[in-house]
Amino acid sequence: MLSATTIAMMLADARLPVGGHVHSAGLEPALASGMDPSLVPAYILGRARSVTLVEAGTAVVARHVSLGGETDDLAHVDRAWAARTPSAAVRDVSRSLARGYLRLALRLWPANAAIEACAGADVPFSRPVVVGVIAAAAHLDAPALVRLVAYDDAQTVAAAMLKLEPLDPIVPPGWVLDACAAVEEFVDTISALTIPDAIPALGAPESEGWVEAHSRSTKRLFRA
């Protein structure tokens, strides 16, 4: 059996075919709406203290539910996430990315009841719910899952920045480390969550507005 650390490294790998190449974590919409590129480090930190905690909390609760075998409750977790994600465009992108994770999960963990429940859901689940279910299947503990979600979000923005603006590639890794450090103080609290109602409700209204506008654009590199 592979170690949980190895699984976490795999899930954090940008080369994983789960759709990250079509997603900038809202950076392209932000820049297209006039945000100065110099503010990208602050943008990443802002996400680390808001939407990342919602995503991480959702993933942790989905992991807990999956480990308990109550797969029917995953829909409740997904509804709690949706209630904290007002933008229809953001929800749509998340569910699309989740399908990529499910394709991977079905290949790597066949016959896993929670993964099969996600794949067979009438309404597609969001990415954090699917990531939480994968974490349960892979024996990834809750603190590692929180850190994985934080790293993935920050790294997605950093990687997208290199495609959108001229920049020395040695710079963005520092942004990612700063974002992960900013999340560290919340790791214990988020890791202890077990019920959907406890998922943080922290929004980013301006960012969601940018993504909504971006979803109607015909000139874009990323979906969001």
Image (cartoon, rainbow, N blue to C red):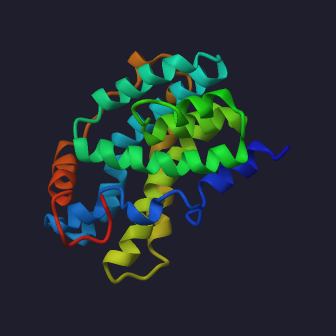
In the rendered image, the vertical position of residue 17 relative to residue 54, given as above or below? below
Residue at the outermost right position: 1
Q: Residue at x 57, y 20 (%)?
A: 71
Picture quadrant where residue 175 is located: bottom left
Q: Is residue 28 above or below residue 44?
A: below
Question: How many numbered circles does the render carry?
Answer: 0
Which residue is at 40% across, 49% downward? 96
121 displayed left or right of 137: left
Instruction: Report the residue at 31% width, 45% height from top.
Output: 92
Residue 6 located left or right of residue 145: right
Residue found 55% across the figure and 40% down from its top:
131
Q: In this orientation, does residue 186 appear?
A: no
Residue 220: % across, % down: 25, 70
- The answer to whether residue 114 is above or below residue 32 is above
Q: Depth check: 131 or 114 in front?
A: 114
Q: Position of residue 100 (x, y in %)?
A: 52, 52
Can you see residue 127?
A: yes
Which residue occupies the foreground of this view, 155 or 45? Answer: 155
Which quadrant is the N terminus positioned in?
top right
* Quarter location, residue 27: bottom left
Position in image of residue 136 (x %, y %)? 66, 32
Q: Position of residue 55 (x, y in %)?
A: 43, 38
Query: In which quadrant of the rendered image does the C terminus lie?
Result: bottom left
- Check the image and report above or below for 92 versus 35: above
